[in-house]
Image (tube, rainbow, N blue to C red):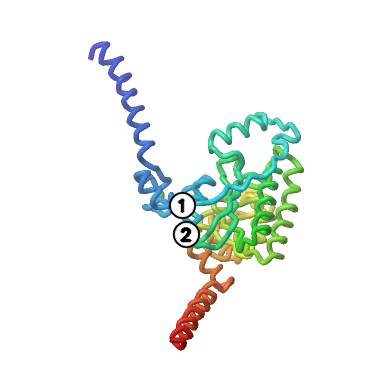
Amino acid sequence: MNWISRFIKPKLKSLFKKKSAERDDALWQNCSCSKLTLKEDFAKNLFVCPSCNKPHPLTNKQRFDLFFDDSEYQILDYGRPPEDPITFEDTKKYKDRIKKAIELTGEDETMTAASGFLNAVPITVVSMNFSWMGGSVSPRVGECFLNAAEHAIKNNHKAFVMFITSGGMRMQTGNLSLQQMGRMTIAMLELKKKNILTFSIAAGPVLGGTTASFASVADQIYSESDDYLWGFSGKRVIEQNIREKLSDDVQKSKWVFDHGQIDKIIPRHKLRDEIYNLLSILLKLKEKEEAEDRGNVTIDKSIREIA
Ligand SMILES: [Zn+2]
């Protein structure tokens, strides 16, 4: 081996390696089960791994595209309170963390709200993205949520669907974040007063103040995986307090379902149908359709009688 093969070849090799790795990333989706899926097939399977059925996290846009009829919806704009109300800084400035989260996700806050239809039933949907600062709730998230609830009430929507994943309240906005727990819970009560059905769906881990407020007061509470965490304090904190080791399944959705806090585990590809089925029963949509059909028959009969 001469100096050329010793030095140039590995360098060239690494160049090729880099390019092929980039090509792989563009084409293939990896999963924790270590199986690769073509990204095209992965998207067709609603971003769920076909090998192990693990639902992969979605951006809010992806969630809306999958959930609304024909991927058509209107994003609800809301007024924005100051982004950094207490000029917070720890190891990084809060403003820098915001910039990084926007770059990472392409979304301007962890929560986005949208208005559209589910099988022609008008609904409002809010969705959270855990990659955006751990789905933490800030005053802006509170504004987004309240605006969405007002929109549902003003437009006489039939359901308010929440895809929730959140580590709790955002510490970088201090007490102002904690206040959102009360505001968002009041908004949920207002929706209930107007007979708008509320659905809380765990779309990833749901913890802290989020579980302790709006996520737990919906009419129906679902999880799209039996593996997502649902709880208030972290498991380690509980173990330290009670001085006892908890089993591995504690706080996972299946365990929470078995203990009555979650109503149903519904895989991602069944969510639209399950929610619509419940809505159609509660809103008596099928009976109305049948009544309309009967009405048409009566008209036909009367026409025949006249004839
Ligand atoms: Zn997998």
Alpha carbon of mark 1 to alpha carbon of mark 2: how far? Answer: 8 Å
Q: Is mark 1 within 8 Å of ligand 1?
A: no
Q: Residue 10, position in %: x, y?
A: 31, 20
Looking at the image, is mark 1 or mark 2 earlier in the sequence? 1
Which residue position is annotated with label 2? 267
Q: Residue 168, position in %: x, y?
A: 66, 47
Q: Are marks 1 and 2 in contact (CB under 8 Å)?
A: yes
Picture residue at 37% right of the left edge, 44% below the top? 39
Picture residue at 74% right of the left edge, 47% below the top? 178
Q: Quadrant of the N terminus?
A: top left
Q: Residue 65, position in %: x, y?
A: 48, 50
Q: Is residue 13 left or right of residue 123?
A: left
State the residue lying farthest toward the left.
1
Residue nearer the viewer, 26 or 150: 150
Residue nearer the viewer, 264 or 119: 119
Which residue position is annotated with label 1? 55
- What's the amino acid at mark 1? Pro
Q: Is residue 90 above or below residue 166?
A: above
Q: Secondary structure at mark 2?
A: loop
Picture residue at 72% right of the left edge, 32% below the top? 88
Q: Is mark 2 within 8 Å of ligand 1?
A: no
- What's the amino acid at mark 2? Pro
Q: Secondary structure at mark 1?
A: loop
Q: Residue 257, position in %: x, y?
A: 56, 64
**Mark 1, residues whose alpha carbon is within 10 Å: few (<14), some, or many (≥20)?**
many
Q: Is residue 163 left or right of residue 238?
A: left
State the residue lying farthest toward the top.
3
Residue nearer the viewer, 144 or 28: 144
**Mark 2, residues whose alpha carbon is within 10 Å: few (<14), some, or many (≥20)?**
some
